[in-house]
Amino acid sequence: MNLLVARKGADAAVGFRKVDRIMNNYALGRDIRYLIWRQRVRIRRGNTLLILLLVPTFVFLGIFFSAASESERSVPVGEVDGVGVSKIWYFAEGTTREPFQEWISLLNLEGEPSEVVLEYLFPDGERLERRHAVPALKKKIVKASGEVPPGKDFSLVVRSEKPIVAERSIYFDSLGMKGGYQVKGATRASERWLFAEGSVREGFETYLAILNPCKAEALVDVSYLSGKGKEVKRRGIKVEAQSRFTIAVHEPGLGLGRCRGSAGDIGIIVESKNGVQVVSERSMYFSLGNGVVGGHGALGVPQAQSAWYFAEGTNREGFEAFLCFFNPNTSPARVNIEYLLENGGKVERKGLTIMPRARLTVSSRDKRYGLGGTEGDHLDFSTTVASSNGVGLVVECPAYYSYKPFWTGGHISSGSESPRSVWSFSEGCLREGFDTYLSLFNPGEKATEANITCYFGGSRGPDTKSVAIGGNSRATFALAGGGLGFGRHEGDEGDIGVEVETKNGSQIVVEEVIYSAPRWRTMSKETLIKTWGRGEVFAGNTSSTMVALTFDIESSSRNTQAILDILHQKDVHSTMFVTGQFAQLYPETIRKMAFEGHEIANHSMTHPHFTKLTAPEISAEIGTTEGIVQGLTSLSTMPYFRFPYGDRNIPAIQFLNSIGYVSVNWTIDSRDWQHPPAQVSSTVLSLLRGGAIILMHDRDSTVQALPGIIDGIRSRGFVPVTLTELFYPGP
């Protein structure tokens, strides 16, 4: 009899453990588990009859509450398979903190308008809804700061009446750190998210944003796994229902803290332990010590795969791409890498082993598993990664670049599980200051052709171009290109979405890359000056609301640094006429000008009276300064020159024009070298008009007056810009 009771007690305990597992996921589980525990005590005392009554009762209760709570643990899936559009999009990351600016891009590829609801979810559980109409075959941009109060972190759920494409762009510019990146949202939540990339080395800041879109609290574990096989786990992180949670991975606590070398390169697992679905994104900000600064972000992937495809990759000078491999399994993964080049060539690397529960990084310039250096035809490429032993893995491809002088940053791809015939992107820009590219990868043997359709903001209708892609090859398409591309567009028409579709249904992989910089950097100064004519300019277009702040920088590095700080705080770019002597004495100040997006122009070498110089002396004064600035920044001072003291004559202007420069005079002389700050400000603001070129210097009065001048310019409805922006697009 005692053996029978013991056996029944054991069976009942198994039943109770099953109920425990069911009820562990729900709010009522704690109370029910307590009652079960009390009955376990009675079981051990031999109360067999009560066992028979309680077990079915609690099993029933577990099933009942499990069914009732399913809707609280999960959220709908919105994706339309194979097309890249969805009625629901989830974004874990979002902020209106300074110095970040965020936009949500919505692309409607349907023939009818669609109503879209944006639901912002905050860390404290508060929610905010906003509604928007997205016209048929159009792109709409929503600026987050126009809807969310300042200083807020948030996640976002996008719900649309019709299938759309949704992406988020974040741009930032703080002292020493600036850049931008784009992320396409998730179309579903999951109990698990995997990241192959993450770094807690010095120079990197890594963040995890976790969105819980469900009606039940999520209990989350986060695991950090390094290249050395070390694993650190943070358990039991509570993410409240319908809220957002953030982890600074580079900090101790819930993060990992700083680590050196390969121990600082990590793979990450975010896992909900109570069955509540979440969405997770990783953001990284970096300053690499070689002048490359920026940020990139990516959505995690729900599961490891045996194959990954990457359309974008380059070994051009100034670029370095990486493959980050993460094996979350308990068995090694044997990996083959295939690089397909733009010229149709192929490079295979076989036999790479990714150890269990570990992360490994391969540079595109690695000679064994990458492509080596920048020589030959190994420049632009696409990549296929395949596990030869069937062990799934996660792969990401970050790239860091100096795209052009002081166009630095990074971008990252989480790869694609498979090729397909249709690809859609809601973010893209044809405005000045943005270069947008599509990388098209054809892993098939046969050549194909794809239609690229551009959907504009504003009133402009869609436009379509075609591009050929060779078999086992990749092609690059410059969206703003004036030949095969769609050209430059300003205003709403410059904000675009893109759809790529192969003509014969063949399967390809497409990725989009966007490089951004101050607007004037993509404008052709030579073309602009030709439209204005050589000679001398005193103002821009007088019907414009733009005015140009220009500074003659001659002597004071301290004041120049203060001016740069004020311009940065006020988010203003200017044109700075520097002397060669100043540039020689203060090279870091010149580099700071360039880094912060200011236009550098020529103000001679020694600041002489030009009417007293011969042609060779004029040439030397200008050429020496040009050489010094070029050497410090890789940027030319052409085509803008300002005569010291305004001392010039017709022969001097004509010679200046003959060597490629235009004489830039001024509309308003602030006389900051002579007057106190209040009078300097009064002079500028009282004479203000559209198209004005404002002359200032590196003086004490300038520093004190400048904040009020900028505020006064804006309060009067004018916009302070560089000379190139003032002259664009012509008289």
Image (cartoon, helix red, strand yellow):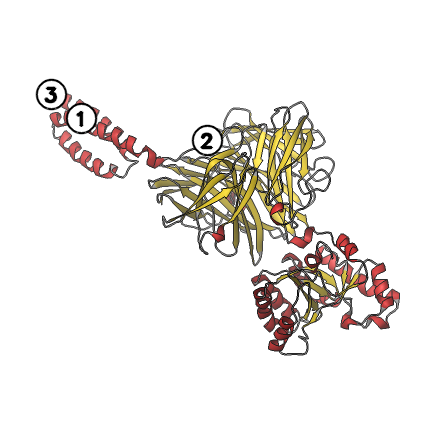
In this view, the mark in front (3 or 2)? 2
Question: Taking the image as drawn, is residue 115 in sight?
Answer: yes
Q: Nearer the viewer, residue 575 or 416?
A: 575
In this view, the mark in front (3 or 1)? 1
First reached walking from the N terminus: tag 2 or tag 1? 1
- Marker disc for residue 1: 3
Question: Residue at left 44%, top 55%?
Answer: 149
Q: Is residue 12 left or right of residue 100?
A: left
In this picture, is 257 found above or below 594? above
Q: Position of residue 478 (x, y in %)?
A: 68, 40
Q: Nearer the viewer, residue 673 or 559?
A: 673
First reached walking from the N terminus: tag 3 or tag 1? 3
* Disc 3, SS: loop
For disc 1, the marked residue is: 9
What whole-number distance in Å separates the C-alpha atoms at marks 2 and 1?
A: 37 Å
CA neighbours of label 1 inside 10 A, class few (<14), some (14 to 19), many (20+): many
CA neighbours of label 3 inside 10 A, class few (<14), some (14 to 19), many (20+): few
CB atoms of marks 3 and 1 within 8 Å? no
Q: Amino acid at mark 2?
A: Asn
Q: Nearer the viewer, residue 575 or 429?
A: 429
Question: Residue at left 11%, top 28%?
Answer: 47
* Disc 2, SS: loop
Q: Nearer the viewer, residue 636 or 485?
A: 485
* Disc 1, SS: helix
In this picture, is 685 found above or below 278? below
Q: Position of residue 24 (x, y in %)?
A: 28, 35
